[in-house]
Each structure stands twice: as structure tokens, then as C-alpha cells.
Image (spheres, helix red, strand yellow):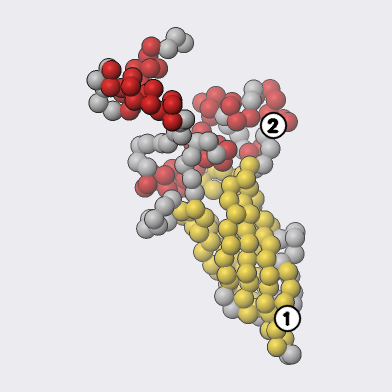
Amino acid sequence: MNELHFDCLGARAEPHAAFPTLVFRLRVTEPSPDGVHAVALRCQIRVEPHLRRYGPAEVELLGDLFGDPSRWGDTLKPLQFANVSIMVPSFRGVTEIDVPVPCSYDLEVAAGKYFAALDDGEIPLLMLFSGTVFARSEHGFTVGQVPWHCETRHRLPVPVWRELMDRYFPETGWLRLRRDVLRALHRFKSERALATWDEAVEVLLKETPG
């Protein structure tokens, strides 16, 4: 069994999933003549924020994630994005598969907060692979491990992320509040006879100095 090689060919927003899902197109290469019976593949995806530039508005929004820009040389560390598992079916030489990755718009999650702060450009991703390889042999099957150093990089266009979130949360976002804070906001909304939560928050912002 020869060593596996992975390449990410692109990513798209899945239009028909029950929840926001990015689909990464992965090419898997294994050059042995006998081929591969199956791969139980695990993929860890990390964001590498130090590999791109940021505009002034992005810098401002990323302050609570990475601190003051003067410290970004130390604080721009990789962020965990996803862990997914998938079965790669039998192939010989080269195959391509879709890797669906469920995504969260939760702004309490570091990766979600990071994605939401970006206006344009690309998101540098590192895909790390592990798992078990089942291969054919003259005596039946052999079982091996995906080498620890198998990885590939992909630069996800920010518009693809925006498209995904707009499909499921058009022109909206999500904040998680403590129950007592939510009740206090509810009372404020009722006392002011405000029609929507947006109006309640907008009034609070206007009444807050600075």
C-alpha cells in the first residue's frame, strides 16, 4: 500500500441540507496497482488567521477575539473549525469525494465569530487527515493507518461562506443570551411597546453613550 495524497479542489454551499453545510470536494490519490478497498477517513479543519490581511473594519470586529492589533503577532493562533468523518469507497489510483461539513453561526464559537467579521477575501484553512485504510492484497486485505502528516490547504472564499449563511439566516445573525438578560430585554421591549427585538436593541444602542 502506497501513501495516500489529498487535495482540496474547492468548496460550495449545500442548498438542500437541513442545517448550514459546506461541501468540500476532495481528491484522494493512492498509486498502488491493487487500489484501495475503503478508507474510514477523519478530517480535522483549522482556520489559519495569520495567513491573510485584514481591513480596518475587520480589525475592529476581531479585537475581542485576538486582542489589540499590536499583539496579533502572538495572538493570531489557529482556530478549530470542524471535525468530520466519512467513508471513502473503493477506488484505484484517484477518486474524488464530497466532504460535508456542518457549520454554526453561533457568535460564541471562535470560528463563527471569525467568519462573521470578514468582509471579503479568502479564509485560509488547513485540513488534517487521519483514519484507517483497507487495501487489497494477494492474501485478502491489509489494514493500515492514514499517515499523521497527510494534510492539505484550501482558501475558502468569504462569499461562499456568506452565501451559505444567507441561505439559512438571510440578513440575520444569532446571539446567545443568559435567561435573565433575555427576560430583562423582553421587559424593556414590552415597556417601550417595541414591535421587534431589532427595535429593542437599536433603542438600547442609541441610549448608550459612545
Residue 185 point in image, percent of width and height:
37, 23
Label 1: how many Cα within 10 Å (few below 14, some 14–19, many 20+): some
x then y, percent, for residue 69: 65, 24
Give, as a three-letter code, the residue at label 1. Thr
- CA gap, disc 2 and disc 1: 44 Å
- Bin the neighbour count of mark 2 within 10 Å (Cα to Cα): few under 14, some 14-19, many 20 and up: some
Q: Is residue 51 above or below residue 43?
A: above
Write the residue at 67% across / 60% down. Answer: 129
Q: Nearer the viewer, residue 94 or 89?
A: 89
Q: Residue at x 63, y 42 (%)?
A: 79
SS at circle 2: helix
The answer to whether residue 123 of the structure is visible from this angle is yes
43 to the left or right of 185: right
Which residue is the site of mark 1?
Answer: 142
Residue at the top extreme, as displayed: 209
Query: Residue placed at 38% from the left, 11% from the top?
Result: 207
Kindly identify which residue carries mark 2.
Answer: 75
**Residue 150 appears left or right of 187:** right
Q: In terms of image quadrants, where is residue 91? A: bottom right
Residue 121 as seen in the image, left or right of residue 193? right
Number of labels in the image equals 2
Residue 186 x, y percent position in the rendering = 34, 25
